[in-house]
Amino acid sequence: MVKKFQRIYTSTAAGAFEEMLRDALSQVDADGVIKLAIFNLPANNSEYKKNLETIENITKEVFGELSPLTSYISQRTSHGGVTIEATYIADTCATIEHHRNYKLISHNGCREIITGGIIPRFDGGSTFEQSTDIFEGIGKMLSVNGFRTSDIYRQWNYIPGITMLNDGSQNYQEFNDARSIFYGRDNWAGGYPAATGIGTAAGGVVVEICAIKDEQCANLPIDNPLQIAAHNYSQQVLDGKVIEQLSERTTPKFERARLLGGTILISGTAAIKGECSNYSTDAVEQAAETMEIMDRLTSKENLPVENSGSTYDLLRVYVKRENDIPAVCEYMQQHYPATQKHYLVADVCRPELLIEIEGVAHI
């Protein structure tokens, strides 16, 4: 595994998107940066597309032709401006092949693919159609580099109107069905990726992946005794009608976390025990239960290797109702003061859920 770490940067300047983006980018250390996840809420789909072009132009201007990968996620930040979550490579001896929307990283016999935000090749279309197009592109990219689909170890799935129903078909379920069809081409004997599925406010479906080939590195799924594995959910907790290509609604194909070397990659986690949601209308209560679940997931006793405990490096906190952010932030800061965190306004995968949290920890 190539060692990586994340840093969070937020814009301090007010104004147009370009001004806020330049301000945030001016804080980014260019040494070793390989990927920028850029969060900001555009007014509509047209502005989202315009901002995508602005990101491409300005990152090339700031970093040159071999600029970091980018992903633009249409979610309001807690401060209303631009937040950048930057990923860095700590191994300075790693070799990097630069491609248009992915990087191939090699180091000591390990090969990794990291992508930016992958979007459909067309405007419009259903969530299923957009997702299918994205996965076809990902499949080709993996294949041409000698990777299998089951080499994916981390995935982010950003879905506009995630819980919306269109003629009885739910957007999140359509995405899960497209993912299940794509994943069905391979044997996932080592478990599914860690993953996040979260709502966005504009643009189309966006997917990011990380894949690895490294026989010397631990790469293990981590289950949670407090939760049923998402890929084992019953039909009762899935929503929307069954699509023509399938005989039933398919489950979300991800693990609660993966251990990669000494790094714990924590999937998007909400206040779900067993497979049942916490229906409390108190966002802090849901945040506390979510962190109880994550603390159990990353506990010394639950990790699949010998260890002396773990520490959170990064927590990305999605909050459904913007007005809940101050109270949730206060709770998180009180209980996890040393961890870098940022807060985003986003719909969660079930209508009753108010909080979702993902993160990175290390043993």
Image (cartoon, grey):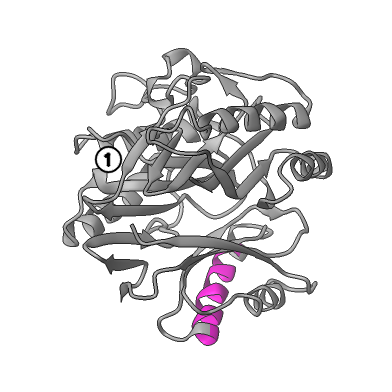
Q: Amino acid at mark 1?
A: Phe
Q: Position of residue 119 (x, y in %)?
A: 42, 57
**Is residue 72 rendered magenta in the image?**
no
Query: Do we see residue 98 in this rendering?
Result: no
Which quadrant of the figure has residue 72?
A: bottom right
Write down the region rendered in magenta. 48-62
Given residues 357 and 76, the one toward you in this image is 357
**Quadrant of the image occupied by residue 208:** bottom left
Please identify the dominant SS of the magenta region. helix
Residue 141 position within the rendered picture, expressed as x and y whole percent measured from the top left: 25, 59
Residue shown at 25% from the left, 43% from the top? 150
- Is residue 313 visible in the rendered structure shown here? yes
Residue at the spot 36% in from the left edge and 32% down from the top edge: 177
Q: Secondary structure at mark 1?
A: helix
Q: Is residue 235 above or below residue 88?
A: above
Residue at 39% in and 56% down = 120
Q: Which residue is mark 1?
A: 182
Q: Position of residue 193 (x, y in %)?
A: 36, 41
User: As drawn, is 237 to the left or to the right of 139?
Assistant: right
Picture mark count:
1
Q: Is residue 197 left or right of residue 231?
A: right
Given residues 265 and 72, the one toward you in this image is: 265
